[in-house]
Image (cartoon, helix red, strand yellow):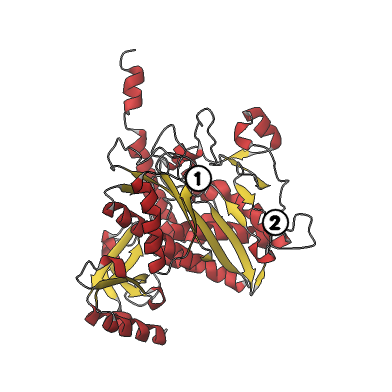
Amino acid sequence: MERQKEFVLRTLEERDIRFVRLWFTDVLGTLKSVSVAPAELESAFEEGIGFDGSAIEGFARVYESDMVAMPDPTTFQVFPFEGRGIGESARMFCDILTPEGAPSWADPRHVLRRSLSKAADRGFTFYVHPEIEFFLLKDGSENPVPVDDGGYFDHTTHSTARDFRRQAIIALERVGISVEFSHHEVAPGQQEIDLRYADALTTADNIMTFRHIVKEVALTSDVTASFMPKPFTTQPGSGMHSHLSLFEGEDNAFHDPGDEQRLSKTAKAFIAGLLRHAPEFTAITNQWVNSYKRLFTSPQPGQISEAPSFVSWGKANRSALVRVPAYGKPNSARVEIRSLDSAANPYLAYAVLLGAGLKGIEEGYELPPGTEDDVASLTNAERVAAGYQPLPSNLAEALDAMEASELVPEVLGEHVFDYFLKNKRSEWEDYRTQVTAFERRRYINL
């Protein structure tokens, strides 16, 4: 760690970096930032930067408001494209501490670290590969218009959409974030960029950086990048399908060459944990009122919805909540969870997903039979007969399931658990009492 601090301080001087941004997120995943002068960074490494925690969503009550942002030098990255002729800038993520130097229970990064530590105690390292979907819009008003009319894998000729992904990927790679794939998604204006797999904490940091860079690049093109789960009634929403794997040293713990499905007992128990606890963690992976418009959508004729509404798993089945992709090399064995949307707090989301999978391993959960059905196209009677339990259909149901859970408060900690429930109950009440344009159109003349 000391060598990393020395590297950061030396780089600041050599690169003439004028601004150092210290980043962290609140409980809901909103990015927070404070800038420090390079000359002040050495003392920040020793003492941190004090701030008023009571002003940050979910961090502290007024009478315990003093908190400290401690820069993590391992996350240092120069942002060479932000200088615009006035010196380069850089960023580091922070761990949030109490004035006594203890980790803050309200810090989402600390929540994920706790889950990773529990996995490490069992000999596991947790890796994640996210597929991040979002929309490019001509503006961010209440009546947004997509920048193009493209569809899935279309090679769009619209200059904004065509150039945007190229510029965004170049910017991401210049800050050390590796991109595997990018393409146009199903809906007009919808894009997907897939990040290379990394350990879960690095991935969560990368997702927060990704959102910032994508929005910045969009602004330079006079468009808006939106991570809203479902901005259009008649178009698919934006998910963040995430591929998960556990490694024991250099070996993939999910692979068993002797199994008919090439899945180890560890992988099967992990999947079973995701399935059993899915209703309980859905409020975390799908945290907004709008998230449930994506999960419970009505596809237009000829349109496919890949957002799962029911608890099931299958091999290469994109209608299932958990999919086991076909793979070649043993170290590519993984499971993909498809409910997660791109507006979730990635630290909390990956913490609860890992917590559910580890619970399945610890308790030896049995994996139910997989499905090859298109679950969304079945009738309710067929789904009941097959045993496909629905996910919560709205935020209120998701919060009820979360509140009744024993696992989720254990993973999040009581502080984050209680604050999240309180905040989201308030969001639901605000939504529930709104009279919408739909209601006025439908009922005002009855």
Above or below: residue 446 compared with residue 429: above
The x, y position of residue 202, in whole percent, is: 47, 68
Above or below: residue 358 compared with residue 148: below
Closest to the observer, 162 or 444? 162
**Residue 417 visible within the image:** yes
Q: Residue at x 31, y 75 (%)?
A: 99
Q: Secondary structure at mark 2?
A: helix
Amino acid type for the residue under numbered disc 2: Lys
Label of residue 153 in the image: 1
The x, y position of residue 401, in whole percent, is: 52, 45
The x, y position of residue 283, in whole percent, is: 47, 48
Q: Residue at x 36, y 52 (%)?
A: 163
Distance Cα–Cα, label 1 vs label 2: 33 Å
Q: Is residue 412 left or right of residue 33?
A: right
Residue under circle 2?
268
Q: Secondary structure at mark 1?
A: loop
